[in-house]
């Protein structure tokens, strides 16, 4: 990675860390994890199920909210405030700026997920007194959550490269919601006829598939995740994020700054 | 080698929300700035100065034409390491301190890690901000931000500097300091290209100036050459209650108020008028330049288009 990308990424990380919004969200997520312990205690016999379900869902939702709220401003806010002028007049290529921003926010989310995951594991330890082999699958579920973050971050950046923060937020949230029901869309496509079938199939493949990246439910039930699935989902998330980033770069390369 | 060659840069913006209309911000501009010059880019508000600078910095793409800086194309990263840019009313990452910002910019410009620390404190000192290390930029005043802007432009010791309205937002002492800095840069062999709408800033400082109005170049040259054909005006005030006939012939305009007389003369007649007044043993109260010759030239250069526009409408 070029040193400029690294510097832009670490500055993006620093910006996120100094942003109060982040702390509000993290505080909220910690509360959620705490609540999961409470709920776990009163649901005798299924404590683990409840803790894993609630904890991972909280991590995933708050991560997505952070990714979108920070991601939508990454480019448009810098254009609006004209902070970009003194960056792009240096030997920084526009694509390096976008890629640096992506890694900065992705890094923020990984660090954030790491700390929240510690919270979930502590909660697990608290309700079942010891770790079990099945807890390993929680790590895989966390990994899938991070893959989701990569996609949503790239999408937020993509929208941020051409539209206002508000519109970008609407687009990114809509895609997240639709993508979470991607399996239903695929099912619908398989059943439909004629043009509808083509459209639905096209949409199903174009939209991000967050549904298959969500293994929280099965992991909470102590089921494993196939190695092949881990590989294919990794490839899927990488390719999808890379394409969204390419789109962001293509648009941003041609933009006139305000 | 020319430091900056502007080869017909043109910019047309599309304005209007529903029906887009083209708006010409810059007509094809040809300009050459030599290495080691202080070059003033003068024009009233909305003339197209910022647009030109943004195109040179690769922030806005030209509708036509091209430009070369230090012999390189506009987006060449090797060239960009050797230029510094101070935008108009600069704004920076407000969650950083001045030192952090400069450190970051030093990294982006490829300044060595060892040298960076030293350069950062050096330029902060140079722009008169030595004791702001702990303060986030969100708490900086406009004038302080302007100083940070100057600091980040000179940070990596660039060969060519682009300043957009460098004196704006500064108090008289700050303006003086920026002027001194530009002269110092020139002595160090740097090229300075700066825009301004304040002529007095340019007159004393520039080797050459260009005058631009409504996106059109109206004149280029050394200040002395440009102004050789025009004369400034001077206002002379003295004690007295009548305008002598000999004064009347010299003055463009004269009037008596109470016990003072006021006359406006061309710069060339200033000495003759003062000699006359002294011969008459009259008490001179003040001699004030009304318009310097550059201002006079400037006003003349702006006129034709207005006249033409008047005819058209
Ligand atoms: N982004 C833009 N969209 C439309 N018109 C613009 C834009 N930026 C500048 N202009 C117009 O271009 C002209 C030149 O502006 P500018 O270069 O900022 O002038 P100056 O810096 O000399 O004051 C002005 O008439 C301005 O309204
Ligand atoms: Mg301007």
Image (cartoon, rainbow, N blue to C red):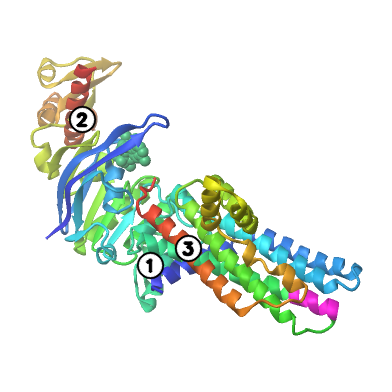
Rounded to the nearest angstrom, the CA distance separating label 1 from label 2 is: 41 Å
Q: Quadrant of the C terminus of chain B?
A: top left
Q: Nearer the viewer, residue A255 or B124?
A: A255
Give coordinates of residue B305: x percent, y percent. Answer: 19, 26
Does residue A114 appear in this view? Answer: no
Give coordinates of residue B236: x percent, y percent. Answer: 21, 27
- Disc 3 secondary structure class: helix
Q: How many marks?
A: 3
The circle drawn on residue B302 is 2
Numbered disc 2: what chain? B
Q: Nearer the viewer, residue B255 or B159?
A: B159
Q: Describe residue B105's horizontal placement relative to residue A139 as left or right.
A: left
Give coordinates of residue B142: x percent, y percent. Answer: 45, 48
**Which quadrant of the structure image shows residue A46?**
bottom right
Rounded to the nearest angstrom, the CA distance separating label 3 from label 1 is: 14 Å
* Magenta range: A120-128
């Amino acid at each position: 990675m070029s040193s400029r990308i690294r510097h832009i990424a670490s500055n993006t990380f620093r910006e996120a860390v100094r942003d109060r919004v982040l702390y509000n969200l993290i505080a909220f997520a910690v509360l959620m994890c705490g609540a999961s312990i409470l709920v776990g205690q009163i649901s005798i016999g299924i404590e683990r199920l409840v803790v894993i379900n609630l904890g991972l869902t909280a991590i995933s939702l708050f991560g997505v909210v952070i990714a979108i709220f920070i991601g939508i401003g990454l480019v448009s806010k810098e254009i609006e405030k004209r902070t970009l002028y003194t960056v792009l007049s240096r030997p920084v290529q526009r694509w390096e700026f976008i890629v640096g921003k992506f890694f900065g926010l992705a890094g923020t989310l990984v660090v954030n997920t790491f700390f929240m995951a510690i919270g979930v594991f502590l909660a697990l330890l608290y309700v079942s007194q010891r770790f079990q082999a099945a807890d390993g699958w929680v790590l895989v579920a966390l990994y899938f959550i991070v893959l989701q973050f990569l996609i949503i971050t790239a999408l937020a950046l993509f929208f941020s490269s051409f539209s206002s923060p508000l519109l970008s937020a609407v687009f990114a949230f809509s895609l997240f919601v639709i993508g979470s029901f991607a399996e239903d869309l695929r099912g619908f496509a398989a059943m439909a006829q004629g043009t509808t079938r083509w459209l639905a199939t096209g949409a199903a493949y174009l939209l991000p598939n967050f549904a298959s990246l969500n293994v929280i439910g099965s992991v909470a039930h102590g089921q494993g995740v196939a190695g092949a699935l881990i590989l294919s989902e990794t490839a899927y998330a990488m390719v999808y994020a890379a394409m969204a980033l390419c789109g962001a770069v293509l648009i941003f390369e041609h933009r006139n700054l305000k | 080698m020319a430091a900056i060659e502007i080869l017909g840069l043109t910019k047309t913006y599309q304005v209007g929300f529903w029906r887009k209309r083209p708006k010409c911000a810059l007509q094809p501009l040809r300009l050459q700035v030599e290495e080691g010059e202080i070059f003033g880019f003068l024009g009233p508000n909305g003339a197209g100065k910022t647009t030109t600078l943004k195109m040179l910095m690769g922030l806005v793409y030209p509708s036509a034409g091209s430009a070369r800086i230090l012999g390189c194309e506009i987006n060449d990263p090797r060239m960009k390491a050797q230029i510094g840019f101070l935008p108009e009313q600069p704004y920076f990452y407000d969650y950083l301190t001045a030192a952090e910002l400069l450190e970051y910019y030093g990294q982006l410009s490829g300044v060595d890690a060892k040298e960076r620390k030293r350069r950062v404190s050096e330029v902060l000192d140079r722009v008169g901000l030595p004791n702001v290390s702990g303060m986030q930029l969100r708490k900086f005043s406009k004038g302080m931000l302007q100083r940070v802007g100057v600091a980040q432009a000179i940070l990596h010791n660039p060969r060519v500097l682009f300043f957009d309205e460098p004196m704006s937002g500064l108090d008289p002492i700050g303006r003086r300091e920026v002027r001194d800095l530009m002269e110092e840069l020139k002595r160090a062999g740097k090229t300075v290209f700066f825009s301004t709408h304040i002529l007095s800033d340019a007159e004393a400082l520039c080797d050459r100036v260009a005058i631009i109005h409504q996106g059109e170049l109206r004149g280029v040259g050394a200040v002395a050459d440009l102004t050789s054909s025009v004369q400034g005006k001077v206002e002379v005030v003295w004690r007295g209650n009548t305008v002598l006939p000999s004064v009347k012939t010299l003055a463009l305009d004269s009037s008596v108020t109470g016990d003072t007389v006021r006359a406006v003369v061309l710069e060339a007649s200033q000495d003759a008028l003062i000699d006359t007044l002294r011969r008459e043993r009259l008490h001179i109260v003040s001699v004030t330049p009304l318009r310097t010759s550059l201002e006079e030239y400037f006003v003349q250069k702006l006129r034709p288009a207005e006249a033409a526009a008047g005819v058209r409408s």
